[in-house]
């Protein structure tokens, strides 16, 4: 099939590459000339395991091409995916200007029936707005009678595992408009996704509004599980329980399952933060409150301060004269995504309290430097006390404590003897519960996980950060 994907960001690039891998003829269009030049040269502007090899294979097979011309992409395609960003506005609502601008451009160039697929995460009602924009653009060209279908096909891709999620989906949610155009869209989408349905049907057909809401509901549910466990972790600390044991105990219940039950320093990334806020805003526009989702968001906001609280409880609010190491900057492993990463809260707070901070991430150093420069209001090279280093061991050289913020595999089983020799103080604040508390104790480390401090270490009950002297 002939496919166009508008947007060469995370979702668009994965979608275009995977559809090409299935044998389709795919054009991916982006207005960023620099990004397209990188892609045309075989480079990949984002980090996602396996994506570069897959992209290059399909480029060489001439199944995947990149362009800045949306006119060429529209002429080429039977099915056009809109996969541009929907960043949050100040009130939490999704900014649809890029989605609607693409819809207008499609309407300015289409000359025959097209299926226009919203792949971007959009609030309920966006399909109708895209349809209105398309009809207006066609009417301006004297083509008001030209038919098309606007479909909702939300993505469910985990950063770091996006290729596997796309190629082995749990489900494919497809929202169709009513009438003949919807039936024509069903036939094309059935053909497009046939490779995924050979052994059992994964496609879930529904109306457009239900598909749009399904995406937000899924992300809100997963975010809620994370915040629930973080809330439980504080109680575990207070009563001397081990949250990891609790996790295994409840996760073994088939009604609950093990996924997204890990306590830590809060969720981040491109989806959960903006989608929970957008869902809260959408409900408010209908005169409703999403009270559970509001609580999820509140717990997550507080959780990003938890390691700073632990550091201040251990060393005092004034951190001048302390050197602290940080392992992990990206919001999760196997990505360089710094959006809403806990490190962007923790590191500025430590610096503001006078600490010297040495940081390492195996992939995200460049992105982190850009993000933290924006957060701190000046280039990180000008920030006194902040040092980026190339290895985990460098990050703990002569430090008073280590903070673990991202669960990269290379952090799971470090050389603890070398760490002990290198560190000035043997204190570990483990924001991802990577290490066994008993092992850490036997190795002579003062160890604090999230919800794993146990009865032998007094829990610090205060939720407000002490202020520096």
Image (tube, rainbow, N blue to C red):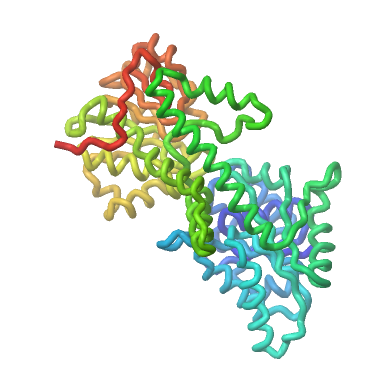
- Name the residue at 64% across, 31% down: 257
User: Between 314 and 365, which is closer to the camera in this rendering?
Assistant: 314
Q: Is 76 situated above or below 313? A: below
- Name the residue at 28% across, 48% down: 381
x, y percentage for residue 268?
47, 45
- Name the residue at 44% across, 12% down: 439
Q: Is residue 259 left or right of residue 314?
A: right
* Among the 4 quarters of the image, the one containing residue 357: top left
x, y percentage for residue 373?
32, 52
Where's the C terminus, which quadrant?
A: top left
Q: Is 161 situated above or below 141? A: above
* Among the 4 quarters of the image, the one containing residue 192: bottom right
User: Between 69 and 257, which is closer to the camera in this rendering?
Assistant: 257
- Name the residue at 83% across, 52% down: 194
Residue at the limit of the structure toward the left, as seen here = 469
x, y percentage for residue 11?
60, 54
Q: Is 101 situated above or below 238? A: below
Can residue 15 be seen?
Answer: yes
Where's the N terminus, which quadrant?
A: bottom right
């Amino acid at each position: 099939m002939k496919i166009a994907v508008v947007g060469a960001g995370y979702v668009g690039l994965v979608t275009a590459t995977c559809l090409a891998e299935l044998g389709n003829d795919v054009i991916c269009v982006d207005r960023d000339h620099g990004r397209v030049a990188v892609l045309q040269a075989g480079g990949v502007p984002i980090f996602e395991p396996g994506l570069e090899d897959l992209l290059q294979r399909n480029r060489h097979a001439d199944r995947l091409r990149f362009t800045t011309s949306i006119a060429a992409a529209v002429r080429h395609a039977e099915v056009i995916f809109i996969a541009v960003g929907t960043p949050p506005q100040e009130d939490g609502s999704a900014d649809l200007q890029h989605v609607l601008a693409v819809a207008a451009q499609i309407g300015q160039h289409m000359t025959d029936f097209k299926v226009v697929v919203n792949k971007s995460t959009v609030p309920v009602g966006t399909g109708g707005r895209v349809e209105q924009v398309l009809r207006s653009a066609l009417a301006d060209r004297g083509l008001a009678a030209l038919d098309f279908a606007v479909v909702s096909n939300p993505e469910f891709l985990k950063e770091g595992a996006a290729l596997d999620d796309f190629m082995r989906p749990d489900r494919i949610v497809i929202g169709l408009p009513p009438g003949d155009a919807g039936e024509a869209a069903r036939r094309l989408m059935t053909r497009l996704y046939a490779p995924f349905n050979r052994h059992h049907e994964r496609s879930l057909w529904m109306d457009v509004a239900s598909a749009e809401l399904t995406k937000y509901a899924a992300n809100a549910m997963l975010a809620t599980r994370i915040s629930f466990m973080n809330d439980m972790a504080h109680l575990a600390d207070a009563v001397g329980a081990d949250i990891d044991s609790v996790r295994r105990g409840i996760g073994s219940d088939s009604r609950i399952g093990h996924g997204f039950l890990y306590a830590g320093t809060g969720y981040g990334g491109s989806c959960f933060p903006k989608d929970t806020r957008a869902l809260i805003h959408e409900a408010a526009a209908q005169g409703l409150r999403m009270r559970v989702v509001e609580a999820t968001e509140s717990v997550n906001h507080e959780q990003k301060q938890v390691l700073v609280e632990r550091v201040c409880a251990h060393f005092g609010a004034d951190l001048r004269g302390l050197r602290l190491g940080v392992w992990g900057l990206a919001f999760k492993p196997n990505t360089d995504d710094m959006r809403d990463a806990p490190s962007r809260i923790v590191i500025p707070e430590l610096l503001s309290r006078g600490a010297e901070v040495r940081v390492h991430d195996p992939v995200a150093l460049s992105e982190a430097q850009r993000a933290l420069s924006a957060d701190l209001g000046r280039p990180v090279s000008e920030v006194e006390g902040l040092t980026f280093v190339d290895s985990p061991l460098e990050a703990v050289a002569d430090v008073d404590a280590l903070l673990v913020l991202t669960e990269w595999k290379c952090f799971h089983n470090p050389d603890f003897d070398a760490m002990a020799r290198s560190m000035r103080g043997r204190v570990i604040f483990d924001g991802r519960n990577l290490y066994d508390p008993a092992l850490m104790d036997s190795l002579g480390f003062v160890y604090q996980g999230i919800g794993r401090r146990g009865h032998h270490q007094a829990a610090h009950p205060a939720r407000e950060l002490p202020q520096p002297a």
